[in-house]
Amino acid sequence: MKKTLLITTLISFIGCSKKTKVLLLDSGKKRNAIVVSTNKGSTLVNKINGFVELVDKNQPPSTIKIMPKDKIYTHYSRLFNIEPTAPRTYIVYFKPNSKELTDGSKIVLNQAIEEIKRRSACVVDVIGHTDTVGSYKVNAKISLDRANYIKNIIKKRRVPLLALQAKGYGEEDLLMKTSNNVSEKRNRNVEIFIK
């Protein structure tokens, strides 16, 4: 697993146990740990596939036990299936001083829209940028115009979304840091964040 996943079996969630289990899975990092606390004590779970059981808030957590991998996937397959998909970013580029996409970016935009369809309903943030040529005020407007242009293309595809918003950052938060008045084609972009 690439993430730490806490699997908690609650009466109200699954309805099959009077105990709560807190399980620590491998996050792929060197350090994995969680502190499980009740009114009567705490236990540090720092072993991969280690878990503690909780009966109620007035009893301390159980000692740490290890759950075999096959049992984890068998018992908690429903939870693995609802784990959220990692966010995805696509970047499209524009010709200077325009809302016209470069040829390669038209393909990338279509890929982004297909990803949005696969994740429907999701949240999409569309963030426009410019290079540093021209005034700060004009670049802020151009970046927002570009972001709104992409937003409108996405809206026209009628994909169910939880949220879709456009923002213009102008010369701020550039992909490639440059001095003022530098024409950098990689900074003339819109980032499409899908989550």
Image (cartoon, rainbow, N blue to C red):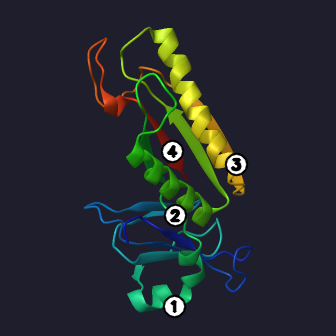
Residue 103, percent from left and from top: 41, 45
Residue found 44% across the figure and 8% down from its top = 135
Which residue position holds label 2?
85
Secondary structure state at the residue bearing disc 3: helix
Pick whichever of labels 2 and 1 is earlier in the sequence.
Answer: 1
Which residue position holds label 4?
192
**Number of marks in the rendered image:** 4
120 above or below 18?
A: above
Secondary structure state at the residue bearing disc 4: strand
Residue found 36% across the figure and 27% down from its top = 174
Q: Nearer the viewer, mark 2 or mark 3?
A: 3
Which residue position holds label 1?
74
Residue found 38% across the figure and 48% down from its top = 104
Q: Disc 1 and disc 4: Cα gap in Å? A: 36 Å
Q: Nearer the viewer, mark 2 or mark 1?
A: 2
Asked if marks 2 and 1 touch (Cβ < 8 Å), the reply is no
Q: Disc 2 and disc 1: Cα gap in Å? A: 21 Å
Asked if marks 1 and 3 touch (Cβ < 8 Å), the reply is no
Pick whichever of labels 1 and 4 is earlier in the sequence.
Answer: 1
Amino acid type, residue under disc 1 in the picture = Thr
Residue 129: name its quadrant. Answer: top left
Residue 131, percent from left and from top: 37, 22
Pick whichever of labels 2 and 4 is earlier in the sequence.
Answer: 2
Q: Tell me if 176 is positioned left or right of 139 in this view.
A: left
Which residue position holds label 3?
156
Q: Which mark is residue 11?
A: none
Residue 175 seen in the figure: no
Amino acid type, residue under disc 2 in the picture = Thr
